[in-house]
Image: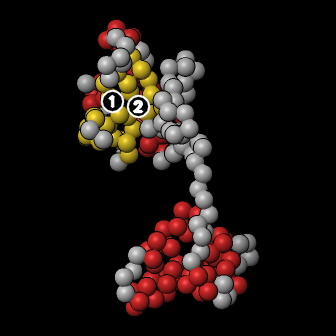
Amino acid sequence: QLMISSGMEECIRWGSPCYRWNNQNVVGLAAFSQYTGIWFFQGSLLDDNAGYLMNAQEGKTHGMRQWRFTSIDQMQQAPILQYVEQAKKLAEEGVKSRVGVKVKEPILPDFLANVMHSEEALRTGWDSLPPGKKKELILWVQEAKKTETRDKRITGVVDIVRQRVLNNMKKRPGLD
């Protein structure tokens, strides 16, 4: 009732109630034999001076934190709504935890490496892309079943990289 009264949208994720705000998962609930837990998807970013939140799976979860309750009295006395409001604000601002997230630099396949290294501007543009974007573009090209489709997608990647180079040039002082 508290989550719904806060204005969040209720849905079911991973077989449990989940509450969303600004199209983002904010809070999840789960009940176990020993406790009931409230999960804050961006909990590592919440102000938790009281120390209610914990990382349930050290080394596995990075930004998510949970709050465990063993009785209804604990829940009724806890400042849950304050934490929910903080979490909603983070969702509104689009803030995401990057704690412990390690994004590997993807390996550039030969068919793209040949194209990206054919011109200095393409190489520079490709190198300026974040690893996640590089991975997305590589997978998009690799998923093509036909040679013609793959070639069109390679052309599309070249266009994206060239556009990035142009946008970066426009941001430099003294250039139009």
Marks 1 and 2, the one that precedes in the sequence: 1
- 1 and 2 marks in contact (CB < 8 Å): yes
163 up-or-down from 84: above or below: below
Q: Residue furthest top?
A: 73
Q: Residue furthest bottom?
A: 148
Q: Could you tell me which residue is drawn at 56 percent across and 38 percent down?
A: 59
Residue 123 falls in image quadrant = bottom right
- Tell how many labels: 2
Neighbours of disc 2 within 10 Å: few (<14), some (14-19), many (20+): many
Q: Which mark, by number, is residue 29?
A: 1
9 up-or-down from 66: above or below: below
Amino acid type at circle 2 is Trp
Residue 125 falls in image quadrant = bottom right
- As drawn, is 163 to the left or to the right of 91? right
83 up-or-down from 122: above or below: above
User: From this viewpoint, is residue 89 visible?
Assistant: no
Residue 60, image x, y percentages: 51, 40
Residue 146, image x, y percentages: 37, 87
Quadrant for the N terminus in the image: top left
Neighbours of disc 1 within 10 Å: few (<14), some (14-19), many (20+): some
Q: How far apart are the two marked residues, 1 and 2, measured between alpha carbons?
A: 6 Å
Frontmost residue, 59 versus 20: 59
Frontmost residue, 136 versus 96: 136
Q: Which mark, by number, is residue 39?
A: 2
Amino acid type at circle 1 is Leu
Residue 159, image x, y percentages: 52, 83
